[in-house]
Image: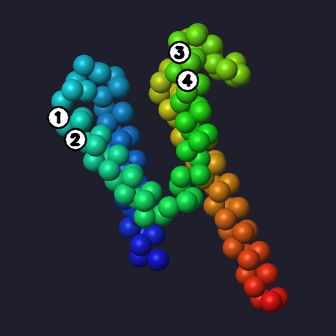
């Protein structure tokens, strides 16, 4: 239990570090080369990876979908349209795409948590019968 608390704390702190960098430096990107921006970004990423490493499977479940969404964003910027045309590439900025990807990640994470919970309950029922 203590291990999970440390992992979740690490993930929350990582999100806060990365979020503060994005909020602080997106309006003035010319300052993104400052050591504060770079160090906070690396610390945030390190905290996120540490938390994910402690928890293993569930936090990594949405990664393939997130990778595809990021790929779709890059292709959409290059072509001028996204693959499925849900959003307009010219009107959708990086911040909006980032928030959409966070929402998708959280949704997929909740689905993974629910299915894992159901799986554990089913396994307990099966083992009790044998």
Q: Nearer the viewer, residue 64 or 8?
A: 64
Q: Circle 1 sits in a helix, a strand or a loop, which is it?
A: helix
Q: Which residue is mark 4?
A: 73
Q: Distance of mark 3 from mark 1, alpha carbons?
A: 29 Å
Q: Distance of mark 1 from mark 2, alpha carbons?
A: 6 Å
Is residue 17 positioned above or below 92 on the image?
below
Q: Distance of mark 4 from mark 1, alpha carbons?
A: 28 Å
Q: Position of residue 9 (x, y in %)?
A: 39, 62
Q: Which residue is mark 2?
A: 39
Q: Position of residue 95 (x, y in %)?
A: 47, 27
> On the image, which quarter does residue 91 sit in?
top right
Other-residue count near label 1 (Cα within 10 Å), few / some / many at <14 / 14–19 / ≥20 = few
Other-residue count near label 4 (Cα within 10 Å), few / some / many at <14 / 14–19 / ≥20 = many
Dot placed on the residue nearer the N-terminal end, 4 or 1: 1
* Front disc: 3 or 1: 3
Other-residue count near label 3 (Cα within 10 Å), few / some / many at <14 / 14–19 / ≥20 = some
Dot placed on the residue nearer the N-terminal end, 3 or 1: 1
Q: Which residue is mark 1?
A: 35
Q: Which residue is mark 3?
A: 77
Q: Position of residue 98 (x, y in %)?
A: 50, 32
Q: Circle 3 sits in a helix, a strand or a loop, which is it?
A: helix
- Can you tell which mark lies on residue 10? none
Other-residue count near label 2 (Cα within 10 Å), few / some / many at <14 / 14–19 / ≥20 = few
Is residue 36 positioned above or below 6 on the image?
above
Q: Distance of mark 2 from mark 4, alpha carbons?
A: 26 Å
Q: Is residue 94 left or right of residue 31?
A: right
* Front disc: 4 or 1: 4
Q: Which residue is drawn at the image coordinates 59% and 31% (left, top)?
A: 69
Q: Which residue is drawn at the image coordinates 63% and 61% (left, top)?
A: 113
Q: Distance of mark 4 from mark 3, alpha carbons?
A: 6 Å
Q: Which residue is drawn at the image coordinates 21% and 26% (left, top)?
A: 33
> On the image, which quarter does residue 7 sit in?
bottom left
């Amino acid at each position: 239990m203590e291990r999970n608390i440390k992992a979740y704390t690490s993930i929350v702190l990582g999100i806060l570090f990365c979020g503060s960098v994005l909020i602080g430096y997106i309006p003035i990107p010319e300052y993104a080369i400052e050591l504060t921006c770079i160090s906070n970004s690396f610390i945030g990423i390190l905290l996120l990876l540490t938390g994910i490493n402690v928890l293993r499977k569930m936090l990594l479940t949405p990664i393939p979908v997130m990778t595809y969404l990021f790929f779709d964003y890059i292709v959409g910027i290059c072509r001028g349209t996204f693959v499925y045309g849900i959003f307009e590439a010219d009107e959708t900025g990086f911040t909006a795409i980032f928030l959409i990807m966070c929402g998708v990640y959280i949704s997929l994470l909740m689905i993974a948590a629910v299915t894992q919970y159901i799986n554990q309950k089913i396994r307990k029922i099966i083992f009790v019968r044998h």
